[in-house]
């Protein structure tokens, strides 16, 4: 028995020491991502976490490039907007899918028709908004929408074109796991829960990408992602945990890349008659009770920028004139007293605990700030899968949420967030407190078919000021900051994108 | 005996049916999956269309009937998140969990029984007291804490073992194994040790208690008196009788093993079924959760039945009317 | 004088369950047509080997075991047709002494509690009387009231059986069923307990049904004796008649098993061949025939009925 | 041997078993600390008005940067680790004793009835018990909370009770089956005792000793289970203190070197469970049915 024990021990020791550290292939890039892909069907997941994988295997008619996220041609070389409802795209010639099929207008028509199929698509809204798709010739398509959609082209970088022939001929299960697109990379192997491997598409229409092989390891735990980086197993990590930022900064082998994110975090307030929050003084007091600077410093470890409104600067409707209300608990108390709530009141603060950076911790801190001015906020944080349906049901009192819109246009967002709830047409779907203001609704509706960019900008800025300053619909907190870390020695050239997508054709080695 | 087996089979079917009913009821209480499936910008009409497409608009009994019908045909439905059959998703993860669990069970069984015998021979030796203290730790340290401690020591401070994932795997037929590569084995050590620890301690204590009882029995005294070698007495006479309950417990503890595997897989990011279950909870992916529960139930019930029947065969004293 | 208890054609059959759906595959014929009568102040002995149904008969009289058919009439009332409250009252009048004094006393109760229990159940001897009654009972069975604060395991076997008797007496019953009350005790103690039972019978005008597996125990107490074999009565007579003139071959064998009282006894010891057959599948005809030395041709055809062979002496055997 | 002598013998064996004494002292200290939490903790970590982000991530007091009221340092929300541990143990013990009380009473009742009456009640409950047992308490509680969510400590207690009563029911039933054949039960029936009296006065007191061992073992198991569930994020809500949650938060900081956030709550949890297990081990030896039978036949 003793022998057995000793030999087992010896075996385990030998196995431990016989193993050298992992070796990274010279031309390959290994990336630790925070979220795994759900599927390889480009239309089945409308979250950025999913779309960023698809952006490597597929192309849209348009694409967004650079740190500003400017809209540039991709599978369409140019586009026209002849009338309010029509969008005409001129397609790139000579592009081939990974299976050798040529890209033509038929594929575009197929793709846009597929969007409306609930079995395979989460872009149903886009799919259903299309009235007709006309193939003018093999390389020209005209898309007509049912109602004017000013931001239609702005969304085209998210709609990835699929190959009609192979998508129709293959088994639906196969389509879900094996992407056939025109993208810069071809999927070689996907072992769910472990890794995704891809190799460069040497025939890519933009030219073959510099990195020939990419391996992505989805690791949900932020501290484990960090461990993978420190032990040299990966080249890049996304979603660096803020609590480990300093540690990485001190490590001479590592390099941190940060950029302000487009997503803002804010607290949604209601104005339901009969509740304390119907009084704007109460909303203002809650705003002023929160020490946002301390949240940024202590909870976000400085990796966030204070926000005064929901949209970020590049978005149409951003209003530089809006300033944050100062942190002033004394004034807040005074306001509460004036409103007749000198002894505070009870309220439930809802929020997700697995969606945004430090989300539950921010909510906890907010509850504490409110307690200090006498408002008793009961904390109710839960997984996003439970939280978001609650928001859409419109029965919350007060909640924490984050938002950014891929279209760079505040209009679409505000119809979801601020318009009074109208379930039939889908207005106010994410207006979880059922906030209701007729003037705001009216102004918002006037932008629905407003195509002129300057006029749009002016109206949306006016609308923004109305919501943030005159009404205090939300308490803005901060814009998140995206943190990435890379191995210094590898000479990786990496510029983070505003939408957090990891697009590997944009990355290179020195 | 035939009657006994037939009765156990019937009971197993009843239990599975009950599990399936409970699973179905779960559907009702897990919140509406359709809202997330329709995409962020969908209108109410579009949401309703998704609901129809997945048959979630029909009355309860119709849905249940269809659910049972489909399950009988091996179709557990499509995952709401990945939109591929849920059963396939789980089976894909099966090899990882199976390798982890079986290595852990073998480790726990060999070391647990071995050390248990060792300790029972000289209960007061210092080394054995140390082992017993260790076993007390084994049953008192929760699995998740054990995992974190091992990561802290072996990955963070010593830096000799990887803290996550399965490492390099090779494909043998449909089976993807990590047992054939050095990297794969290296990744297996910490999670397998974590998973084995509790069972090891339980089996050690069980073996020790059994040995202590058996060693006082007459037939062992007779064996000693006959002048048989200690090895023969211990292994041939004593251990054999101790092993029956030990093996039974090992078989019956399968449910515990599955539960602890979920925890271990979560801590070590092991790409197995447990990890999938936990992420399905977060994503509200009901078909995957339900399939997992049904699969676990099937495995546990089958295993229990086999243990029970074997036990009945070995032990003629038990009569089953 | 009217009968205190009459038992008429009592049958107790236990079903045997088998198979997937627990259908009844057969019966254990534990008691199969037993009849007897008992007068106030008299004692009856039921004798037979273990498994012959004597204990079952005793328990069925108190409905501790539900009978299959037959009638048991106590003081003119059929106990199988009694209402719950009548049955409860019956349990006050009929009591049992158990065979095993070790297991028949609740180990978590002190003796005082054990004796108080029946009184609490029936609400008898309210208030202070209860304590006095307990002390009285303790003295009657030859224990001291001080011992009442002890637990059963602090007593010897004989003492425990005295406690068991005291419990049976607690409610001042008319009939006591003794289920082999002394068989678990040492021979020297047996006599003491038997003497105690005799004394108590005289003092309280009790009736006994004593169940025993040999005749030695019952001879001093019982006026009348029943010999049972495989659920049936094979012979019944006054104890004098039975001792002086046993008729049934089985009775003779039982009698011969009693240790010889004095040297020079001319009775030959009869050794029974074979085992008691299974009550699930009793032999056809006379159940005793496979072991009987006087077996005749008709013995395995039809069971003999009880025949009066004079002076209330009945026997079921073709020899007579 | 007298009952009181058995008792004194147990006391003797207890006093001469240092690990049993140590175990019960540990458990007692934890219970005392939990009861007195509001008076002995330097700070109420769940009083929203008192906790402030100003004091976040302070190391233990003996380290550089340590500050006096925060003996074991603070976490990332500025809560004192020591205070949070004490309140966390309070949750552990509330859940532990709550489950033992609820599941125990229910299980004992079911075991008693199933064992005594038999019939369909026995068949149904024991089939159920077998199924629950083979699924393991951990798995059942985890699935229940994973699906329905842990909204409060009470829900966690119920979720654990749901499968946990089975331990008690099985033990109790086995015990009752053994005892109900005893002659003193028949004797009580013969005197006309109704079912209620039989169950409560005769069966229960005699069948209960093995349950004490189950209680001790179960307490340890449930405390570990609560910590595990809270660690996985399906246990007590964020607003309640819990050792499991502390460890879960601390886990994110192990690479950042803030070891105190995980080591102290982990040590507290293990110490508490070890204390209970030491006591349980002694109890098991003492109440082993074989040994007891030997004693009572003296």
Image (cartoon, coloured by chain):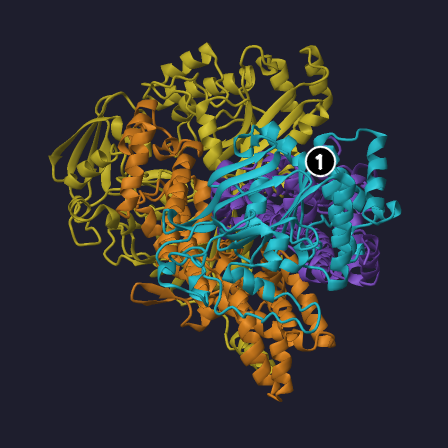
Q: Nearer the viewer, residue C100 or B62?
A: C100
Chain for disc number 1: D
Chain C appears in which tint?
A: cyan
Spot occupied by residue D94 in the image (x, y as percentages of width and height): 69, 40
Q: Nearer the viewer, residue B253 or A308?
A: B253
Residue at (60% x, 63% y) in the render: C255
Q: Is residue C301 left or right of residue B219?
A: left
Q: Quadrant of residue A413?
A: top left
Can the viewer see residue A114 in this picture? yes
Q: Which residue is mark 1?
A: D46
Chain shaded yellow: A
Q: Secondary structure at mark 1?
A: loop
Spot occupied by residue B31 in the image (x, y as percentages of width and height): 43, 32
Residue at (70% x, 51% y) in the render: C221
Chain B appears in which tint?
A: orange
Residue at (48% x, 39% y) in the render: C70
């Amino acid at each position: 028995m003793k022998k057995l024990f000793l030999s087992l021990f010896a075996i385990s020791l030998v196995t431990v020491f016989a193993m050298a550290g992992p070796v990274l292939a010279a031309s390959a890039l290994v990336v630790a991502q925070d979220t795994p892909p759900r599927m390889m069907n480009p239309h089945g997941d409308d979250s950025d976490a999913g779309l960023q994988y698809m952006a490597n295997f597929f192309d849209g008619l348009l694409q967004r490039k650079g740190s500003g996220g400017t809209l540039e041609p991709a599978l369409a070389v140019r586009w026209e907007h002849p009338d309010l409802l029509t969008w005409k795209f001129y397609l790139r010639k000579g592009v081939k899918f990974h299976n050798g099929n040529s890209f033509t207008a038929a594929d575009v028509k197929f793709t846009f028709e597929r969007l409306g199929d609930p079995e395979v698509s989460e872009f149903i809204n886009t799919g259903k908004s299309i009235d007709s798709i006309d193939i003018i010739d093999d390389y020209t398509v005209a898309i007509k929408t049912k109602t004017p959609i000013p931001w239609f082209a702005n969304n085209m970088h998210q709609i990835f074109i699929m190959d009609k022939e192979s998508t129709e001929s293959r088994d639906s299960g196969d389509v879900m796991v094996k992407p056939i697109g025109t993208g810069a990379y071809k999927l070689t192997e996907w072992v769910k829960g472990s890794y995704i491997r891809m190799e460069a598409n040497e025939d890519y229409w933009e030219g073959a990408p510099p990195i020939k092989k990419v391996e992505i390891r989805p690791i949900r735990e932020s501290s484990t992602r960090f461990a993978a980086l420190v032990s040299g197993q990966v080249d890049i990590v996304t979603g660096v945990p803020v609590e480990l930022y300093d540690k990485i900064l001190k490590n001479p082998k590592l390099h941190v890349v940060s950029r302000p994110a487009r997503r803002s975090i804010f607290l949604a307030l209601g104005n339901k008659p009969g509740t304390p929050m119907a009084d704007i003084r109460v909303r203002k007091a809650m705003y002023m009770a929160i020490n946002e600077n301390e949240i940024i410093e202590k909870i976000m470890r400085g990796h966030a920028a204070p926000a005064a409104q929901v949209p970020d600067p590049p978005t149409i409707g951003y209003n530089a004139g809006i300033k944050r209300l100062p942190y002033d608990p004394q004034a807040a108390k005074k306001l509460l007293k004036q409103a007749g709530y000198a002894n505070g009141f009870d309220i439930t603060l809802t929020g997700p605990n697995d969606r945004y950076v430090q989300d539950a911790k921010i909510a906890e801190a907010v509850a504490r700030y409110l307690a200090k001015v006498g408002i008793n906020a009961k904390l109710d944080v839960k997984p996003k899968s439970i939280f978001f349906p609650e928001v859409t049901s419109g029965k919350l009192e007060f909640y924490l949420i984050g938002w950014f819109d891929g279209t760079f246009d505040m209009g679409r967002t505000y119809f979801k967030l601020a318009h009074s709830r109208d379930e039939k047409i889908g207005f106010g779907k994410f207006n979880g407190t059922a906030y209701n203001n007729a003037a705001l609704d009216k102004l918002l509706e006037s932008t629905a078919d407003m195509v002129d960019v300057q006029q749009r900008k002016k109206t949306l800025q006016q609308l923004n000021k109305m919501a943030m300053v005159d009404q205090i619909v939300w308490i803005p907190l901060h814009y998140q900051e995206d943190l990435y870390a890379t191995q210094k020695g590898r000479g990786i050239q990496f510029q983070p994108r505003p939408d957090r997508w990891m697009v590997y054709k944009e990355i290179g080695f020195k | 005996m035939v009657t006994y087996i037939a009765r156990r089979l019937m009971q197993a079917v009843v239990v599975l049916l009950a599990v399936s009913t409970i699973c179905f009821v779960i559907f009702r209480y897990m919140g509406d999956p359709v809202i997330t499936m329709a995409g962020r910008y969908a209108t109410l009409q579009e949401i309703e269309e998704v609901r129809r497409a997945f048959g979630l608009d029909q009355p309860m009994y119709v849905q249940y009937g269809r659910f049972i019908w489909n399950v009988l045909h091996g179709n557990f439905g499509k995952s709401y998140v990945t939109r591929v059959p849920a059963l396939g998703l789980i089976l894909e993860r099966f090899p990882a969990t199976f390798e982890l669990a079986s290595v852990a069970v073998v480790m726990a069984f060999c070391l647990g029984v071995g050390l248990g015998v060792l300790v029972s021979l000289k209960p007061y030796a210092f080394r054995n007291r140390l082992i017993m203290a260790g076993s007390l730790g084994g049953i008192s340290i929760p699995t998740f804490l054990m995992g974190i401690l091992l990561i802290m020591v072996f990955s963070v401070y010593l830096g000799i073992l990887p803290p996550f994932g399965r490492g390099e795997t090779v494909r043998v037929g449909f089976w993807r194994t990590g047992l054939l590569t050095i990297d794969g084995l290296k990744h297996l050590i910490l999670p397998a040790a974590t998973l084995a620890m509790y069972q090891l301690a339980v089996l050690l204590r069980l073996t020790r208690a059994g040995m202590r009882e058996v060693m006082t029995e007459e037939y062992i005294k007779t064996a000693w008196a006959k002048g048989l070698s200690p090895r023969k007495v211990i292994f041939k006479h004593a251990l054999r009788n101790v092993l029956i309950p030990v093996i039974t417990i090992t078989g019956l503890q399968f449910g515990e093993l599955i539960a602890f595997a979920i925890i271990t897989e979560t801590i070590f990011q092991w790409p197995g079924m447990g990890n999938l279950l936990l992420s399905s909870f977060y994503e509200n992916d009901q078909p995957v959760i339900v399939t997992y529960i049904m699969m676990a139930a099937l495995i546990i019930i089958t295993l229990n039945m086999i243990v029970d029947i074997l036990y009945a065969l070995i032990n003629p004293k038990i009569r089953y009317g | 004088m009217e009968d205190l208890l009459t038992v008429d054609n009592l049958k107790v059959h236990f079903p045997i369950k088998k198979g997937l759906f627990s259908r009844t595959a057969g019966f254990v014929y534990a008691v199969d047509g037993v009849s007897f009568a008992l007068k106030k102040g008299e004692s009856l002995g039921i004798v037979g080997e273990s498994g012959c149904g004597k204990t079952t008969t005793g328990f069925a009289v108190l409905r501790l075991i539900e009978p299959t058919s037959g009638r048991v009439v106590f003081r003119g009332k059929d106990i199988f047709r009694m209402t719950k409250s009548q049955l409860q009252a019956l349990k006050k009048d009929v009591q049992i002494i158990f065979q095993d004094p070790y297991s028949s006393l609740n180990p978590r109760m002190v003796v005082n509690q054990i004796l108080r229990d029946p009184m609490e159940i029936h609400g008898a001897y309210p208030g202070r009387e209860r304590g006095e009654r307990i002390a009285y009972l303790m003295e009657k069975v030859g224990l001291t009231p001080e011992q009442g604060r002890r637990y059963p395991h602090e007593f010897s076997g004989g003492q425990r059986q005295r406690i068991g008797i005291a419990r049976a007496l607690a409610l001042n019953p008319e009939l006591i069923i003794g289920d082999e009350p002394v068989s678990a005790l040492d021979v020297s103690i047996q006599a003491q307990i038997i003497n105690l039972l005799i004394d108590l019978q005289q003092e309280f005008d009790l009736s006994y049904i004593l169940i025993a597996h040999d005749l030695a125990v019952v001879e001093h107490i019982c006026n009348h004796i029943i010999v049972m074999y495989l659920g049936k009565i094979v012979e019944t007579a006054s104890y004098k008649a039975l001792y002086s003139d046993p008729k049934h071959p089985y009775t003779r064998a039982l009698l011969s098993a009693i240790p010889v009282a004095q040297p020079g006894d001319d009775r030959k010891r009869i050794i029974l061949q074979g085992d008691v057959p299974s009550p699930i599948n009793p032999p056809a005809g006379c159940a005793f025939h496979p072991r009987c030395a006087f077996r005749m041709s008709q013995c395995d055809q039809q069971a003999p009925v009880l025949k009066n062979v004079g002076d209330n002496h009945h026997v079921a055997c073709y020899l007579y | 041997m007298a009952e009181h002598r058995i008792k004194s013998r147990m006391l003797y064996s207890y006093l001469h078993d240092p690990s049993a004494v140590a175990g019960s002292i540990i458990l007692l200290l934890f219970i005392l600390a939990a009861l007195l939490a509001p008076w002995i903790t330097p700070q109420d970590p769940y009083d929203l008005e008192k906790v402030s982000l100003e004091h976040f991530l302070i190391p233990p007091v003996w380290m550089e940067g340590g500050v006096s009221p925060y003996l074991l340092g603070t976490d990332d929300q500025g809560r004192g680790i020591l205070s949070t541990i004490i309140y966390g143990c309070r949750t552990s013990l509330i859940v532990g004793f709550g489950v033992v009380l609820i599941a125990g009473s229910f299980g004992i009742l079911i075991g008693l009835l199933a064992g005594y009456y038999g019939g369909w009640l026995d068949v149904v409950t024991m089939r159920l018990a077998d199924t629950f047992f083979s699924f393991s308490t951990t798995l059942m509680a985890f699935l229940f909370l994973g699906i329905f969510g842990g909204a409060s400590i009470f829900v966690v207690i119920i979720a654990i009770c749901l499968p946990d009563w089975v331990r008690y029911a099985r033990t109790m039933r086995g015990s009752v089956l053994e005892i109900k054949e005893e002659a003193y039960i028949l004797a009580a029936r013969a005197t006309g005792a109704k079912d209620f009296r039989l169950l409560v006065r005769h069966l229960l007191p005699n069948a209960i000793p093995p349950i004490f061992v189950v209680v001790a073992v179960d307490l340890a198991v449930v405390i570990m289970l609560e910590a595990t569930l809270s660690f996985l994020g399906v246990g007590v809500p964020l607003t309640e203190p819990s050792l499991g949650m502390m460890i879960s938060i601390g886990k994110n900081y192990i690479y950042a070197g803030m070891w105190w956030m995980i080591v102290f709550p982990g040590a507290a949890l293990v110490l508490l469970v070890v204390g209970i297990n030491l006591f349980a081990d002694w109890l098991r030896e003492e109440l082993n049915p074989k040994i007891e039978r030997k004693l009572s036949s003296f």
